[in-house]
Image (spheres, rainbow, N blue to C red):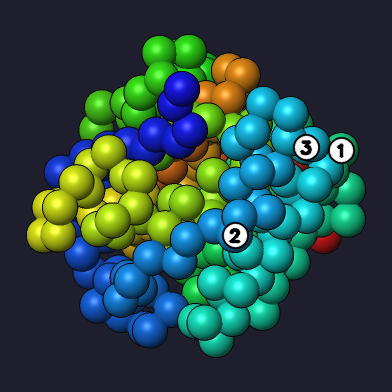
């Protein structure tokens, strides 16, 4: 039975941005080693009988432990986080990870980017970004939890982790999910997120003008501005 599978995709433009971000501040650098989820988190998030509330509590604690190692405070999530859809939770978490490291947030989800992310979630693969833009995308399978996905994308993504793009040290996919989340994309940044059972995806698109007011693919509610208010 599959426990957890991960993959990541980037456009050529995004790959250069991700390399640049990794050489910036310490909080943008890739960790020197993986931080594995706790046994309590693995049981709650991956076991067939795992409880969703317990999964969220343990995964959030694991993230706090990992962020403390980087000199960051725990995630500051919206008070109504538990009432958000999993796609909206992916937006809130990713933007919190970005903003806490001095990066501009994704302004919100859009219908078109959500559709691309959802199609990829159904196919259990990375979403493809729109042509002409810098973009990066992540996929994770095995858990319903956006918090658990964030932990393995951000903190357990190097050699030795269950990252399908990093089977041995030195492969270009090592820490690729983290680099996508923290990429220095051109603003405005919009995001898509998809969920199909235990298949979760996220898509970051830089310079995405169609999301701006009056554009062809406007932001959905709640936006990051609403979530962070």
Instruction: Report helix, strand or loop for mark 1.
Output: helix
Residue 156 coordinates in the image, percent (x, y) = 42, 58
Q: Tell me what residue is drawn at x 56 percent, y 63 percent.
A: 97
Against 218, residue 208 (above or below) is below
Residue located 70% across and 65% down the image: 61
Q: Residues within 10 Å of mark 3 (few under 14, many from 20)?
A: some
Q: Mark 3 points at which residue?
A: 52
Q: Residue under label 2, please give it.
A: 38
Query: Residue 20: x, y in percent?
Result: 23, 69
**Image spot of residue 26 (x, y percent):** 38, 84
Q: Nearer the viewer, residue 166 or 39?
A: 39
Residue indicated by mark 1: 83
State which mark lies toward you, 1 or 3. 3
Q: In this view, does 205 lie to the left or right of 151?
A: left
Answer above or below: position of 109 versus 76.
above
Front residue (pair 122, 161): 161
Q: In this view, does 97 lie above or below 203?
A: below
Camera-nearest label, 2 or 3: 2
Q: Is residue 60 left or right of residue 130?
A: right
Of tags 1 and 2, the one toward the viewer is 2
């Amino acid at each position: 039975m599959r426990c957890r599978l991960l993959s990541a995709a980037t456009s050529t433009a995004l790959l250069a941005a991700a390399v640049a971000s990794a050489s910036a501040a310490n909080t943008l650098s890739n960790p020197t080693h993986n931080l594995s989820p706790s046994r309590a988190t693995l049981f709650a998030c991956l076991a067939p009988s795992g409880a969703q509330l317990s999964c969220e509590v343990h995964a959030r604690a694991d993230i706090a432990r990992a962020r403390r190692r980087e000199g960051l405070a725990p995630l500051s999530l919206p008070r109504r986080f538990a009432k958000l859809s999993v796609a909206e939770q992916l937006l809130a978490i990713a933007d919190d990870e970005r903003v806490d490291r001095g990066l501009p947030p994704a302004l919100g989800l859009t219908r078109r980017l959500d559709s691309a992310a959802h199609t990829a979630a159904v196919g259990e693969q990375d979403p493809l970004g729109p042509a002409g833009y810098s973009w990066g995308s992540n996929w994770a399978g095995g858990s319903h939890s956006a918090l658990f996905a964030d932990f393995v994308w951000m903190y357990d993504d190097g050699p030795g982790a269950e990252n399908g793009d990093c089977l041995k040290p030195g492969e270009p996919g090592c820490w690729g999910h983290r680099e996508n989340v923290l990429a220095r994309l051109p603003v405005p940044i919009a995001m898509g997120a998809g969920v199909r059972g235990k298949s979760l995806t996220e898509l970051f698109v830089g310079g995405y003008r169609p999301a701006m007011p009056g554009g062809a693919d406007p932001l959905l509610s709640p936006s990051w501005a609403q979530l962070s208010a």
